[in-house]
Every structure is written in C-alpha cells, then in structure tokens.
Image (tube, rainbow, N blue to C red):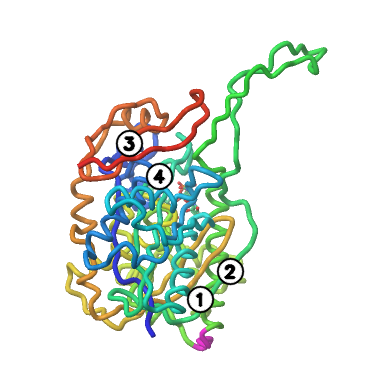
Amino acid sequence: MKVGIDSISFSIPKIHLPIETLATNRGIDPLKLIKGLGLQKMALLDVYQDVITMAANAAHKLLKNNPTIAPKEIAKIYVGTESGVDSSKPIASYVIGLLEQIYGPRSFKNCDAVDHTFACIGAVDAMQNAIDFVKANPTKKAIVIATDYAKYDLNSTGEYTQGAGSIALLITANPRILAFESQTGVATESVFDFFKPRRTVSKQAITGATTNEPWQGVLETEIAIFKDQPVFEGQYSNECYIKQIREAYQDFKAENDLKDQKVYKNWEAILMHLPYCYQGRRTFYEIVLDENPELVNRLAEDAKDQIKAFSKSEAFMQLVQTKIAPSEIASGQIGNIYTGSIFLGLLSTLTHFATTNKAITGKPFGFIAYGSGAKSKVFEGIVQPNWQSALPKQSIFDALNLSTAISFDAYEGLHKKEIKTAVIAPTNEFVLDFIEKEDPNLVGARYYRFVQ
Ligand SMILES: CC(C)(COP(=O)([O-])OP(=O)([O-])OC[C@H]1O[C@@H](n2cnc3c(N)ncnc32)[C@H](O)[C@@H]1OP(=O)([O-])[O-])[C@@H](O)C(=O)NCCC(=O)NCCSC(=O)C[C@@](C)(O)CC(=O)[O-]
C-alpha cells in the first residue's frame, strides 16, 4: 500500500525586507548576497504573527482545500519546529485550540498532538512518524506542520538568511502527490554547529560589589530574556552539513541495495534543506564527486581547487539548473524557514513543474534533509498521478508576488520588538491576541483569535 503526501499548503508572512536594503545598510556588497548566496528577500513576521498563527493558518488552509475531510478523520497533528514557545505545552496543542475556534468546540478531541524537535529536520521526523502510523492504520489521516521563525542576531552572518513560514502536509494512504516507499538513509553526530541553549540575559548589574570585596555583591533583579536567536558558527555548520549529508546518502544506498548505482542521476528533482537559497548547489557537488571519484583527486595537494573548479563547472551547473534550481525559487524570496525549508523546496518545485507542464508522474524525487546538532536523512518519494490537483489553490509564487517591502527602520523595529502596531492589517487569518504577563518580562498563557 502506498502512503505519503496527499495535499500541501503554506502560510507565509505578508511583509519582507529586500536583501539589497539589508546589504546597503550593513555595508555588504549586495552582489555577494544576490549572486553568491541567491538571496532576494527576507520574509518577516508582523506584530500579530508567530509560529503558532502560521501553523494554524497553514493547517486551516489545508482543511479548506480538502472540504470532504472532517476534523474527526484527522488522527494526529504532528508539528516539526525548533521555535517552541513553551518547554511543556506543544505548538500542536495550540493548533488544535485554534482550529476548534473554526471547526467547533472539541472537534479535534480524539486527535493525538505532539511536537518533534531536532533543529531543521524535526518536520521530516514528524512526517516519517506520521507515515509509519498511516501504514499501520491505512484508513486514518495525519496532518504534519512545519513551523518556524528563523531569527538571527542583528549584524550576524545569519542575519541575511532570516525568514519565516509554515508548511502543512496531509499524510494519507493512496496519496495524490508523493508516495514514500524506500528505506531512509541516516547519519547522526552530536556537534555544536548551531543550537539554542536557554539563555537568560541579566540586564541589572550586581550592586554593592567592589574590586576588593566582590563577594559582597548582590544581584538585585535578574531580568530573564529568552533569546529566539541561535548560537552558531556559520562555516563550521556548513562543514557539519556536508559531512552528514554525504554519510546519509551512502547509508541510503546501502539500506536500499543501491551500492552500484549513482542514484542521484535517477532523481527528477533534488530537495535539500535550504538554510538559504544556494546551500543545495553549494554543497551537492560533494555527493556528485563521491559518486564520480575519477573527476577529482581528493588526496591531491590542490584537491580544494579541483573541487571548487568542479563546483563551478558547466556540467555541474547543468545538473543544478534541471534538478535543484526549481526548489530554490521560493527560498530566495523567503529565506530560511528551518523545519519547513525542505518542504518549501518541494512546493516550489511542484509549482514550477506545474507551470511548465513538466511530465513528472512516476518519477522519483530525492530528499536530503539536515538538522543542526546534527542529523541528515536521505530518502526518495515517487510522484503520483494526481499531484497537480492537490496543490494549493493560491500558488506560492502568487502569494510571494503580493508581499509588501518594508523599510530598514521598520525591519529593525520589528526585530527588536519595538513596533507594536500591525504593518499590514490582518484578514481571514489567526492572529496573536495577547500574552498574559505577570510582569513585563515573564510571559504566561497566549491567546489567539480568528480575524475575518
Ligand atoms: C551560510 C553562511 C555561513 C555563509 O557565509 P558567508 O560568509 O556570508 O558567505 P560565504 O563566504 O560562505 O559565501 C559567499 C559566496 O558569495 C560569493 N561572492 C562574494 N562576493 C561576491 C560578488 N561581489 N559577486 C558574486 N558573488 C560573490 C562568494 O564567492 C561565495 O560563493 P562561492 O564562490 O563559495 O560559491 C552564513 O550565512 C551563516 O553563517 N548562516 C547561518 C548558518 C547557516 O545557515 N548555516 C548553513 C548550514 S547549517 C544548516 O543548514 C542548519 C540551519 C542553519 O538551518 C539550522 C537548523 O538546522 O536548525
């Protein structure tokens, strides 16, 4: 029996900062970001949006696009995220609460709900668990939601890769879009390339301490600020990414008895985790070279130069244009959305192929997922005959064309949480209403409502 993605939807912010505006204000050559990393825009959350509103909006759109499915048919809502707002209450439970505002009280009362966290790969884990569940219970359905806000420190090397968005997938038997049949290749290693330790920033200095008697100091008040931004090392994170994807790719071949085949050659499209638009094309040549060792002598003194030359070669660029570039179209206009990035690449590819009338039914798509910390998974999905009928009613490209550019000052104001009024008024969507606060810095329950 085939199990996989039956339907897909998305929720993305309505405002963005043009990458050129960021580059100019930061003194970076815009061509480095545009031509070097493929960046065009950074999608940004408005004041009433967060990872929960995006998740609920994506799930609501998924259900609206599938009006014959009743809430009670959804046995599981699994969320993949690394932007949790609480160490105990999962985003999945918030999503159920929000959906019940539309579909009626307790309409999801028998639905199992949980979050999956492993940096950017959490939604792939969520999807694979949902697939295993549906394989064992073919009459049941699951919704998987990837939702994240990729926020980095101002002036950091991550700043220009920021983005936000949510992707929702309906997982069923006999899916319309993709069926997953092969074994998954995995590579895992504990590293600190990118992580989000709980950090409290004390704004109040210790008082009463002197150089001679530092022990006399009293910490008057500690103001706890949990930062959304990660601790990371950019170039090291790239090394970890490359190491794990190469190992997971080899494991995929071993798990599926494909040791003698260059499997990427069969893949019609390659969907990689894209922390920024060109990460796929800036790393996949390593796998091509592993498969074709005659192209470069990795032990030679000038191995680095040989590898660089291959990465810019016409042969490799042709592969990029046919198999990787379709997944980059949406990424360049949104930025990193962490757990959703690989599925945004899938949506971008399918939308591009639908627009260009490409015959892809029955063809395999290769998935190369990565989550910092670190883990990579490589697996394959086969395109199903009715894939076009299951795409969102409003295409991702049309939604992106409607996005509004904001000024650099507005961007910094939103980043520092200094702006309190909506940049674009909400319509037909869930919004964050208010957060209970015991004092200005300690947050409590979060309240949401649907705005017509
Ligand atoms: C990704 C990095 C490290 C990039 O770091 P960087 O220092 O901004 O850029 P770079 O030096 O690596 O590359 C710049 C490129 O621009 C080119 N360039 C230069 N000037 C020009 C010009 N004038 N005209 C045209 N091209 C130009 C230059 O030649 C080069 O291209 P290449 O030749 O190497 O292909 C940085 O943005 C960063 O720190 N990002 C945050 C971390 C990150 O995204 N890491 C990626 C791997 S880890 C991951 O994917 C997991 C993650 C982050 O999503 C989190 C999770 O799992 O939860």
| Residue corresponding to mark 2 | 187
Q: Of label 4 and label 1, which has the lower sequence position?
A: 4
Residue 416 among those drawn in magenta: no
Question: Mark 3 and mark 1: span between their CA atoms?
Answer: 38 Å
Report the predominant secondary structure element of the magenta stretch.
loop
Q: Measuring 32% from the left and 36% from the top, which residue is drawn there?
A: 48
Q: Quadrant of the C terminus?
A: top left
Q: Measuring 40% from the left and 74% from the top, which residue is drawn there?
A: 366
Q: What amino acid is at disc 4?
A: Gln
| Residue corresponding to mark 4 | 162
Label 3: which secondary element = loop
Q: Looking at the image, is 74 positioned above or below residue 12?
A: below
- Measuring from the top left, give residue 390's x and y in whole percent: 24, 69
Q: What amino acid is at disc 1?
A: Thr
Left or right of 189? Residue 437 is left
- Measuring from the top left, give residue 437's x and y in whole percent: 47, 28
Label 4: which secondary element = loop
* Numbered range of the magenta stretch: 256-260
| Residue corresponding to mark 3 | 48
Residue 184 numbered mark, or none: 1
